[in-house]
Image (cartoon, helix red, strand yellow):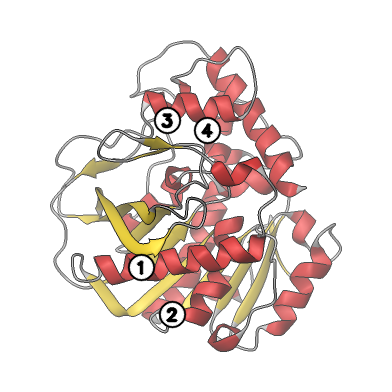
Amino acid sequence: MRLLRFLAAAAILITALAAAGPASAATRHPLPAPTGPFAVGIREFHLIDDRPDLWVPERNRELMVSAWYPALAPVGKQDPYATPQESALILASQKVDGLAPEALSEVATHAYVDAPQLGIPLPTVVLSPGFSMPRFSLTALAEELASRGYLVLGIDHTHEAAAITFPDGRITECLACQGRPDAAKFSANRAQDVSFVLDQLIPRLPVDRSRIAMGGHSAGGFTAPYALAEDVRIRAGFNLDGGFPALPYGRAVNLPFLMMGAPHHAPSGAYGSRWAAVYEAFNGWKRWLIVDGATHGSFTDYAPIADHLGVELPGNTLHGARAIELTRKYVSAFLDHHLSGVPTPILDAAADPEIRIA
């Protein structure tokens, strides 16, 4: 199962983090700097819905959301990647002994808390992380998009991540990881999370309501067709190496969609037949990109962190920094094209040797 293989890969990476020894946050495992013209700001939101939580029905659904945005200046405190408590829980979830509990809290980011933001309406991207992973696992992508002028909303899906911290100090863990959850069921629930977040934050942030996209990694990516089908505000979607639990339906089939994955999701790969069926079901603009040398975790922050340490994720022959560079480049091109009408020739004829168009 891809999820289990990725968790094993993450455990190996985290072991390397622990073995690297102490160092300052300014120099240890930095994520690649964003390349756009804007500084990056970040704000955090705690949102409570009136619907029951899928995993704890006696409680209302509540979510933590990070909003990355183009800032007027790099002013304020630099955003921490993870708290020591979150780091400890994430590491413990990998069931690997001998780890430094605070390892992930020493990763540096490039965003500034509550930095002054641009006041104009911004094209907006909702990001959903992989199953068991926190919203900050997509920080490198979020920071890149914000530096290019996008507002990015990263959602923590409560009880589906190893650690989520709430303002009152509570930390929820991954209740959903204790069994084999129905992927279609929790994807539909994630799509409801996406719509709720948009309901709550459109009035509070400079969202351009006519330019909203949604996507993510793994489970976050295969949530995108559900969100496209159910929310008329979303006009484009993308999936980074996530298996699809169902075919796209409703309005989703006619909307732009990007599928970008490792070779196991190539037409001849182990999971290629499922991607082929989904790709065939989309009737609008679509692209299926294969990243040679990548593995499941290559589309997340774990790739550049591993690269910085000189550690390879199992099954990965592509340097982590290059993997995240390609992810950011092609996702940005997709969004530029479909939210802003910018010509992006690389989506028609890939400009990088590692990228194949299926």
Gap between marks 3 and 4, in whole Å? 17 Å
Q: Earlier in the sequence, mark 2 or mark 1?
A: 1
Gap between marks 2 and 1, in whole Å? 10 Å
**Residue 190: x, y in percent?**
50, 63
Q: Please name the residue that numbered disc 2 is placed on.
A: 231
Gap between marks 2 and 3, in whole Å? 32 Å
Front position among marks 2 and 1? 1
What numbered label is drawn on residue 196? 1
Name the kind of residue labelled 1 in the image.
Answer: Phe
Q: Earlier in the sequence, mark 2 or mark 3?
A: 3
Contact between labelled residues 4 and 3, with CB atoms less than 8 Å apart: no
* SS for dot 3: helix
Residue at the image point whose x is 67% and y is 48% from the top: 296
Residue at the image point whose x is 52% and y is 47% from the top: 160
Name the kind of residue labelled 3 in the image.
Answer: Glu
Q: Earlier in the sequence, mark 3 or mark 1?
A: 3
Q: Earlier in the sequence, mark 4 or mark 1?
A: 1
Contact between labelled residues 1 and 3, with CB atoms less than 8 Å apart: no
What numbered label is drawn on residue 318? none
Q: Earlier in the sequence, mark 3 or mark 4?
A: 3
What numbered label is drawn on residue 305? 4
**42 relative to 304, above or below:** below
Front position among marks 3 and 1? 1
Q: Please name the residue that numbered disc 3 is placed on.
A: 86
